Image (tube, rainbow, N blue to C red):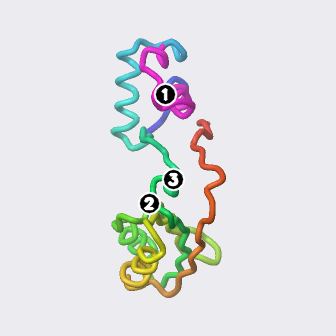
Amino acid sequence: MQLDDVSKAIIEQLQADGRRSYADIGKAVGLSEAAVRQRVQKLTDSGVMQIVAVTDPMQLGFTRQAMIGIRAAGDTRVLAEQLAEIPEIDYVVLTAGSFDLLAEVVCENDEELITLLNTRIRNLSGVSATETFVYLKLQKQFYNWGTR
């Protein structure tokens, strides 16, 4: 989807404050409330943008968050699709470097992480090795990098 300057401005308005009203956004970008509503709907329907509440999982009782580096044998795209189906995994990316994939997980506790690693992730066909990076503290998490 090709984005024009107005759509990019709408995205930037929502990155600054995802609860901002369509009327306020319209004033800032020079559109009517209805036009903003339509554009936001198109942006969300197309998958360009999501409007969600971003939280610190650790403050919500998910005391174990980690990034798992995965070395794979075979087609990493297939493995990425399988990993994406696991509910505890909130982020999957194919990479270049010492790991083929990275998967971020959010678990209630260490026991859930151990079970996830041993029964769900390491058992997938194509996983040859994993390395787990346990998060001790979430220092910064922002999604307001703007548009180009």
Mark 1 or 3, closer to the camera: 3
**Dots 3 and 2: beta carbons under 8 Å?**
no
Counting residues from the start of the chain, the first of labels 1 and 3 encountered is 1
Does the magenta-highlighted stretch encompass residue 20?
A: yes
Q: Amino acid at mark 3?
A: Gln
Q: Is residue 17 shown left or right of residue 115? A: right
At a point 43% along the width and 66% down the height, the residue shown is 108
Mark 1 packing: few (<14 Cα in 10 Å), some, or many (20+)?
some
Which quadrant of the figure has residue 50?
top left
At a point 60% along the width and 66% down the height, the residue shown is 135
Q: Nearer the viewer, residue 34 or 133?
A: 133
Counting residues from the start of the chain, the first of labels 1 and 2 encountered is 1
Image quarter of the N terminus:
top left
Element carrying mark 1: helix
Q: Amino acid at mark 2?
A: Asp
Mark 1 or 2, closer to the camera: 2
Give the residue pinned by disc 2: 90
Q: Position of residue 11 (x, y in %)?
A: 51, 31
Element carrying mark 3: helix
Label 1 to label 3: alpha-carbon separation = 33 Å
Q: Nearer the viewer, residue 3 or 18?
A: 18
Give the residue pinned by disc 3: 59
Counting residues from the start of the chain, the first of labels 3 and 2 encountered is 3
Q: Amino acid at mark 1?
A: Ser
Q: Position of residue 5 (x, y in %)?
A: 55, 26
Read off the magenta span. Answer: 7-26
Residue 7 shows which numbered tag?
Answer: 1
In the picture shown, does residue 71 fall above or below 15? below
Label 1 to label 2: alpha-carbon separation = 27 Å
Element carrying mark 2: strand
Q: Position of residue 63 (x, y in %)?
A: 50, 64
Image quarter of the C terminus:
top right
